[in-house]
Image (cartoon, coloured by chain):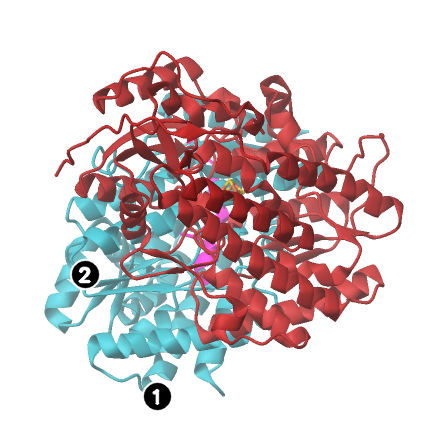
Amino acid sequence: MQREIVLNNTKYETKPVECWAKMKELRRWHFKHTWEVAARGGTVFIGMPEGIQGFLAGLGDYAYPSYGPYFTRMIRDSQQTIKVLEATEARGHTRDMCSVMKAYIGQLYMGMATRAPQGYTIKPAFVIQTLNCHTMAQTGQLYSEYLGIPYLAIDMPHKSSPETLEYGTAQLLEAIEWMEKITGKKYDDEKLIEGVKNEWKSARLWASIQIMNQNIPAPYDLRMTWSLRMPLISMRERPEVVDYLKMLYDETKYRVNNQISARGMETMRLFFEGFPPYYYIQILKQPQEYGAIYIINENNLGHGLWKIQSDGTYQIGETLEERGIPIRNREEAVRAEMALYFDRGRSGTWYFPPSRHIEVVKRAKDWKCQAGVIALDRGCHGYQVSIMERKMALQEAGFLVGTFEHSQADPREFSEAQTVDRMEAFFDSLGLKKLVSAGVENEDAEE
Amino acid sequence: MESALATLRESVNHRHEYAQAWKQINGGKVAGVFCIYVPEEILHAMGILSVRIRGSREPEDVTEPYITGWWCAHCRSSMAEVLKGKYSYVDGIVYAVSCPHVYQVYNSWSRHGNLSYTYDLWIPENTRNNYALGFLQKEFSKFARSLEDWTGKSLNEEKLSQSIQLFNLNRQLLSQIYELRKAAKPPLMGSEAMEIILAGMAMDKGEYTKLLQDVILELNTRNPPAPRARLMLLGSENDDVGLVKFIESFGAVAVTDDLCMGRRYFAGGSISTDGDLMQAIATRYLNRPHCPQKDIVERNRLPQIYQQIEDYRVDGVIYLLEKFCEPHAYDLPKIKDQLDKMGIPFLILEVDLTTPAGQFRTRVEAFLDLIDAKVVL
Ligand code: SF4
Ligand code: SF4
C-alpha cells in the first residue's frame, strides 16, 4: 500500500524560539556545576543513571558529568572524536562497539573524563548505572575498575508488573544505604521527594510539549526539539528544569495558538527514526531545503511521561496526583520513581518492547507525517533492535521510508556526500522540490 | 566402537530431523530456546523438548529485511534457518533476556512466525544484587504457569524434581568429560567436546544422558598422542565445529573453553531438590559461570577463565570473537592484559559467517609457532 502524498505549500509565520537562551544557560550551568560541587566537597559521581535522576536528588549537593563532561564539545570536532575513538581501539576494543560509549571510554583512557577545565583531576565517589542498556552497564564496570571506585548497578527490567516495580524499589532503597556508606553523607529524604516530584513534572511537561507538535503547522521541528530536550537528559529532577519546561510549554502553546511554525513551511511532515549522526547533526535540517521538516523521533519522545496504548497511541501520562500515588516518605518516593521509569516512553525501557513496530506507525499517523527516514546506526546495538521491523511496518502501512547508514559518534563510519545525495534522491522521490529560500532559520538552535 | 559419540554427532548434524522424529514419537511440543539462561529443567518437566536456536553458519541472503548486516553471525544465521523453514517443527520460543542481538531474532520470529507460544523471560543483569534471587524465583514460577496454560498440563513437583536430578546428572557427566581433558594426552579433541555440548542442546535429556555415560567409557579406551599445544577457546555463541577442527588440524588440542556452546552451558554445580524448587533453579542460574552480559559488578567469569588456564595447563588462548559482538568486545582488553601478565600467548580470530581460511591458517600457524618456541625456551 502506498499513500498519496499531498504537498502543503502554505507559508506560515515563524520566529526564533525564545527559550533557547534559557536552555543554553541551563546547559552551561550543568557543565560548571560538576567542578563547583567538587570544589566545595559535594558528591560527584559518574555514570548514566537513566530513569532514576529524581532518586539522586537525595544526595543533596551532587553532580554527575555522565561518563565525562566533554562529549558534546568533542563530538563537534571530528578530528578530536577520531583521536578519542582510536585511544579506545588502541587499548584493544573493537571497532564495532557502541561509538558513543567508545567516545566516552577513550576520554577515560586519555584522562579527560575526570579532568576539570582548569586542569586538575577529580576522583568521583562511585559509578552509578541503570542496567537498561547493557552497553552502559559494561561501561560502568569498566570505569569502576579503571578508576578504582565502587560500582552501583541497578537492574532495570523492561516490563512493568507488580514484581518488577517491587524489585526496582527494593534495589533503590538498598542503594540509599550503600551511597550513605560510600560517601559518609546522610541521604536527604526531603530532597529525594522533591526530586522525584520534579522528574514527574518534567516528564509530563515534555510529553505535553511534544504532543503539541501534532498540530499543523508544527511549532518545532526535530532539530529544535533535539536541543530543547537537553536539560531533561542531564538534570530533569531539578526545579530549574521544571521552570524551564513550564516556560517552554507556555511558549509552545502560544506558537500553536498563533500558527507559528518551526521553519515557515511544512510542505511535508517527516518522521526520523533512530539516532542522527551527532557530528553531522545538520542532517536533521536537510528537509528544510525542500520546505519540509522532520517532526518526530522515538527517542526524543521517550523523555516524556506517556501511557502507550496497545494500538500504539502515545497518550500523555497522568500526574502523580491523577494516579493517586502519594509521596510522603522515602519508600513511596522510590516506588514512584520506579513507576515513572516504566511509564516513560521508549527511552528507559527501550529496546525490548515487542510493540515498537505498532507504535512507530501510529506515531507517524498521529503526528501527521507522510513519509520519513530511518537512520541505520552501526553504533548503538540496543536501539537498533526492531529497526528493520519498524521499517517494514511503516512500509506495510503505506509510508515511504528512506534509510541511510552511519554510526552516531564515529565520523569514520559516515560519508557526508553520499548520505546527502541519498537523502536528496529520497526527497525527490517524494515529489519534493528544492526551494530557493528555505524560510527563517533558527541558527541559534545549533547545539 | 565409538558408537555413542557417533550417535551424538549424528544428532548434531541432523538436529532438525531429530526434533521432528521426537515430536512424532512423543507427540509433545518443541520449544526453541535462546540463550543458556532459559531454565530447561522446567520445560523438561512439562514434557517439552527444548532445542537451542542456532544457525548453520552458511552464507545467507534472506535476513536483510529483518536484521541489519551488522548483527552477529550467530543471530543472522539463526534467523536464516527460521526463514528457510528449518525450524518449522518449533511450536513456541523462549527468550531469556541477554543481548539485544538475540532479542531481534526472537522479535522477528514472534512477529512473522507461526508460533503458538512466545515468552520473554527477564533474567537479572546484575545477578549479584540481593533481590535478584527472589525476583528470579517469581519469574520462573510465572514462566511455569504460562507453560501450563500453553500445554494444558500442570507442573508436578515430583516431575520437576526428577527433571532437576536428570539435569544434575547430565552436568556431572559433562564435568567428568571436561575433567578427562586435563590429562597430558586429552582423550578427545575440542571439536568433539563442542559436538557433545551441541548434542545436549538438541536432544532429549534422558537419551542424551545415557549416551554421555557411554561416551565416557569410550573415551577411557582411547590413547591419543600428546598434543603440540594445549589451547583454551574463549568466546560467545560459537558453534562452529568446523572452525575448531581447523584450528586443531595443526596439531594443537583445545582442552577447555569459556563458550556458550561449551563449559558455560553446564558448569556451576548442581541444583538442590530440597526446599523450594523454583528458588533452587533460580539460584543455579544466578550463580552459574556468566557471560559478560551478566557478569556485572563482581565478576565471576574472568577469575574462572584464569583458573582454568592453570587447571588445564593451557599453553595459549584463542578468542573466537564474533564480529559485532559487543558484550565480549568489552572484556577483551582486560583479558588480554591479564594473559600478558600470566605469560599466556593470546590470539583473536574475528569470526563471521564465512571463515577466511587462508588468513586464519597463517595466524594460527604463527601462533602455534610462538607457543612451540616458548615451550622450547
Ligand atoms: S543506548 Fe545505544 S548509544 Fe546509548 S549507550 Fe546504549 S548502546 Fe550506546
Ligand atoms: S552475546 Fe554476542 S554472540 Fe551472543 S548473541 Fe549477542 S552479539 Fe551475538
Residue B360 placement, left or right of A89: left
Which of the two residues, B115 or A394, is positioned nearer the viewer here?
Answer: A394
Local SS, label 1: helix
Q: Residue at x 35, y 63 (%)?
A: B120
Find residue A276 and report its horizontal and vertical position in percent.
45, 31
Chain name for mark 1: B
Q: Amino acid at mark 2?
A: Leu
Judge whether residue B270 is colored magenta. yes
Rendered cyan, the chain in question is B
Judge whether residue A272 is colored magenta. no
Residue B264 placement, left or right of B94: right
Q: Which residue in the structure is indicated by mark 2?
A: B115
Please state the extent of the stretch shown in magenta in the rendering: B250-271
Residue B29, quarter of picture:
bottom left
Chain name for mark 2: B
Q: Is residue A432 something one can see in this rendering?
A: yes
| Circle 1 crowding by C-alpha within 10 Å: few under 14, some 14–19, many from 20 | few
Which of the two residues, A92 or A331, is positioned nearer the viewer here?
Answer: A331
Find residue A399 and report its horizontal and vertical position in percent.
22, 37
Residue A429, quarter of picture:
top left
In the rendered structure, the colour chosen for chain A is red
Q: Residue at x 46, y 40 (%)?
A: A255
Q: Quadrant of the N terminus of chain A?
A: top left
Q: Which residue in the structure is indicated by mark 1?
A: B158
